[in-house]
Image (cartoon, rainbow, N blue to C red):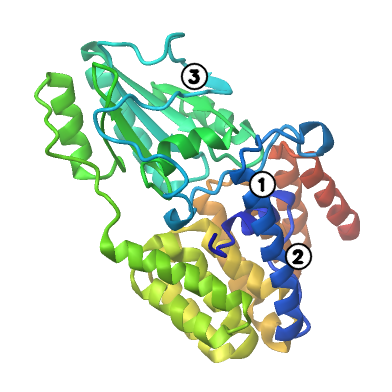
């Protein structure tokens, strides 16, 4: 398993804590991080042995909301463990926990219909951008047998934000929407297709077989869908396999976290810079972590890197921005206070990118206001985060903060 810590970062965001602890020194930080990685390896190995995501429901305060599936998992970690999907075979079963809108026939995918199954998340900005196009396709080709199903399999804090979004969209989202917290659904579809990230779209033909998969922004998607609907599809447009370039990047990603855990920070920075310079947004967390490392070592270099990160793809990735903000707000370096205004600016951007509907982002924004002395704004955003969160532990943590602000 690689040492990538998306799941660690998300757990911090889910329980409302800032992503990175205060560190008195790089040495102290190394010990703390190593312990985290050990925990992640143990948890991951348990999951890979087939434990259900709901195994400890009765024992957990988060029982209704299992851990969010890591949609950015390094494919090196799973391609040897999950049988690969093939064009022309029947798709995996689609076990849905809750239908937010519409439904799938009891017998599964109906022969004679064409299905588009999109895996997405309400917090995913690129996913939001695909909604108008999918809605257009559903309305245009409904009478030709097209059925679109959007499966939210990586929601934060349950299905609350998803349900609010679907209700708000109304007729602008006239296709089926489903929710599941079972990570095996995402794994059996996306990991089996060697996909990482969101959104990913699968086309199922009238015989109930997989015809194509890729992102809905790929030009091939419209070509394949129209061909499947008209019965003129051939296997000329097969899903892209692992490219040699991306395989090299995944290997670098593993090497990055190995050096990070081994306290080889200079080497980690060098490799992380390579990942960032590749322009592949899948490695946003490594890029943000390089900033975190530099911030503890060299304020000037960290500032230069921040400008570089925010002039590229990271400006559109709220999770990466959360890491940047957390780095500033949690640092015990004397110069950290000079960067509080920037942290607030970035927090406001993250709020915009998440449409003001991510409780953890709102909480971080509240803390940023607090650090900048804007107590009324801090109280407002903390209260809003608590209001829209479905997670009791999260709400309790905010209540404790609100008491300190009184």
Which circle's residue, 2 or 1, is located before the other in the chain?
1
Residue of label 3: 101
Task: Answer with left or right where residue 332 lies relative to residue 150.
Answer: right
In the rendered image, the quadrant that contains the C terminus is: bottom right
CA gap between label 1 and label 3 equals 34 Å
Task: Answer with left or right where residue 402 lies relative to residue 125.
Answer: right
Dot 3 lies on which element? Answer: strand
Instruction: Give me the residue at 44% from left, 57% from top.
Output: 76
Question: Which quadrant of the view contains residue 89?
Answer: top left
Asked if residue 39 is positioned above or below residue 100 in the image, the reply reads: below
Find the residue positioned furthest to the top: 106
Q: Are marks 1 and 3 in contact (CB under 8 Å)?
A: no
Instruction: Give me the residue at 81% from left, 39% from top.
Output: 61
Find the residue positioned furthest to the left: 232
Which circle's residue, 1 or 3, is located before the other in the chain?
1
Residue 60 drawn at (x, y percent): 81, 39
Residue 20 drawn at (x, y percent): 69, 68
Dot 1 lies on which element? Answer: helix
Asked if residue 167 is positioned above or below residue 354 in the image, the reply reads: above
Which one is in front in this view, the residue at disc 1 or the one at disc 3? Answer: 1
CA gap between label 2 and label 1 equals 39 Å
Q: Residue 370 carries which label?
A: 2
Question: Which quadrant of the view contains residue 333?
Answer: bottom right
Asked if residue 352 is positioned above or below residue 24 in the image, the reply reads: above
Question: Which quadrant of the view contains residue 176?
Answer: top left
Q: Residues within 10 Å of mark 2 (few under 14, many from 20)?
A: some
Residue of label 1: 46
Q: Which of 356 and 268 is in front in this view?
A: 268
Q: Are marks 2 and 1 in contact (CB under 8 Å)?
A: no
Q: Is residue 294 in view? A: yes
């Amino acid at each position: 398993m690689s040492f990538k810590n998306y799941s660690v970062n998300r757990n911090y965001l889910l329980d409302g804590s800032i992503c990175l602890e205060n560190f008195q020194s790089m040495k102290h930080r190394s010990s703390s991080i190593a312990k985290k990685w050990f925990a992640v390896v143990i948890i991951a190995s348990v999951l890979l042995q087939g434990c259900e995501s709901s195994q400890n429901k009765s024992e957990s305060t988060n029982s209704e909301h299992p851990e969010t599936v890591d949609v950015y998992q390094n494919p090196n970690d799973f391609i040897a463990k999950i049988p690969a999907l093939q064009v022309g075979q029947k798709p995996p079963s689609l076990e849905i926990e809750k239908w937010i809108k519409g439904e799938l026939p009891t017998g599964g995918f109906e022969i004679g219909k064409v299905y588009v199954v999109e895996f997405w998340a309400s917090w995913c900005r690129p996913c939001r951008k695909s909604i108008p196009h999918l809605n257009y396709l559903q309305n245009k080709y409904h009478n030709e047998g097209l059925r679109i199903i959007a499966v939210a399999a990586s929601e934060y804090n349950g299905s609350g934000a998803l349900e609010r979004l679907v209700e708000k969209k109304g007729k602008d989202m006239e296709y089926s929407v489903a929710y599941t917290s079972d990570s095996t659904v995402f794994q059996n579809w996306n990991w089996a297709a060697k996909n990482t990230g969101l959104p990913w779209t699968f086309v199922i033909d009238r015989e109930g077989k997989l015809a194509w998969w890729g992102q809905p922004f790929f030009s091939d998607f419209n070509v394949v869908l129209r061909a499947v609907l008209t019965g003129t599809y051939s296997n000329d447009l097969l899903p892209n396999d692992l490219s040699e370039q991306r395989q090299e990047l995944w290997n670098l990603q593993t090497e990055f976290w190995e050096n990070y855990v081994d306290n080889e920070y200079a080497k980690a920075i060098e490799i992380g810079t390579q990942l960032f310079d590749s322009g592949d947004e899948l490695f946003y967390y490594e890029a943000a972590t390089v900033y975190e490392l530099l911030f503890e070592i060299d304020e000037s270099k960290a500032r230069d890197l921040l400008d570089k990160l925010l002039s590229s793809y990271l400006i559109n990735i709220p999770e990466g921005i959360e890491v940047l903000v957390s780095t500033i707000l949690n640092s015990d370096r004397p110069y950290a206070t000079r960067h509080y205004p920037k942290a607030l600016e970035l927090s406001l951007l993250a709020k915009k990118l998440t449409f003001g509907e991510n409780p953890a982002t709102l909480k971080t924004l509240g803390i940023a206001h607090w650090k900048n002395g804007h107590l009324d704004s801090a109280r407002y955003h903390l209260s809003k985060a608590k209001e829209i969160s479905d997670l009791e532990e999260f709400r309790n943590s905010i209540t404790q903060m609100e008491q300190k602000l009184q």
